[in-house]
Amino acid sequence: MNTKKMILNAILLAIGALLHQITPSFGGMQPDFALAMLFIIIIMNKDYKTTLIAAVITGVFTALTTKTPGGQLPNVIDKLITANIIYFILIPLRNKLNNNLKMGIVLLLGTIISGTVFLEALAILAGLPAPFKVLFIGIVLPAALINLIAGLVLYKSVTLALKRSNIKA
């Protein structure tokens, strides 16, 4: 059972990394589909160790494929912090909300948290190309909306594929 989950998580991480690599940047904004896959893994796996490992791997993959100058280390930092916050936010919600609603909340809130942490880390480590407020409103919020829509589609696709293949996540 653990081997199946590890393989599934590895496949989801690989898909997220691939989507992050091929997703174009729209006016400096790039939706983070690797982040959406990280959130799917956090929802499907309820243990902290998996969350932490997936966050590190996602951070490394997004650092390798970032289109932001100086964004390598901020990508790793933001994935680690965001995954921890989302994991602990989900603890009281796990048995109270259905997975689709949890996924929507996590995608929107998590992308905003991730974008904020990324911008703060980038400001400290490399400097921002524009004021924080401009980048937050112009990049983070639109990316959160795109991640919400695309992430829900990805989540539905993953759950449908798992259901049809008789794999329990």
Image (cartoon, rainbow, N blue to C red):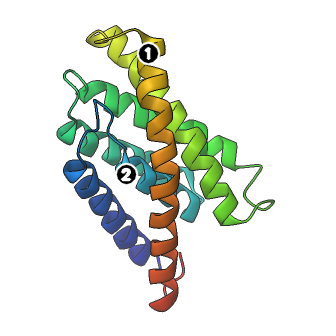
Amino acid type, label 1: Val
Depth check: give the residue in front, 77 or 97. Answer: 97
Disc 1 on helix, strand or loop? Answer: helix
Disc 2 on helix, strand or loop? Answer: helix
Question: Can you give x and y, in whole percent of width and height, for residue 111 in the image?
Answer: 50, 39
Residue highlighted by disc 1? 134
Q: Is there any visible trace of residue 81 in the rendered image?
A: no
Specify whether 63 is left or right of 33: left
Question: Can you give x and y, in whole percent of width and height, for residue 46 in the image?
Answer: 60, 59
- The CA distance from mark 1 to mark 2 is 22 Å
Amino acid type, label 2: Phe
Residue occupying the point 44% across, 72% down: 5
Discs 1/2, front: 1
Question: Can you give x and y, in whole percent of width and height, for residue 40 in the image?
Answer: 50, 59
Specify whether 5 is left or right of 87: left
Residue highlighted by disc 2? 33
Residue contact between numbered discs 1 and 2, judged by CB atoms under 8 Å: no
Question: Can you give x and y, in whole percent of width and height, for residue 2 in the image?
Answer: 45, 73
117 vs 142: above or below: above
Residue occupying the point 50% across, 32% down: 141
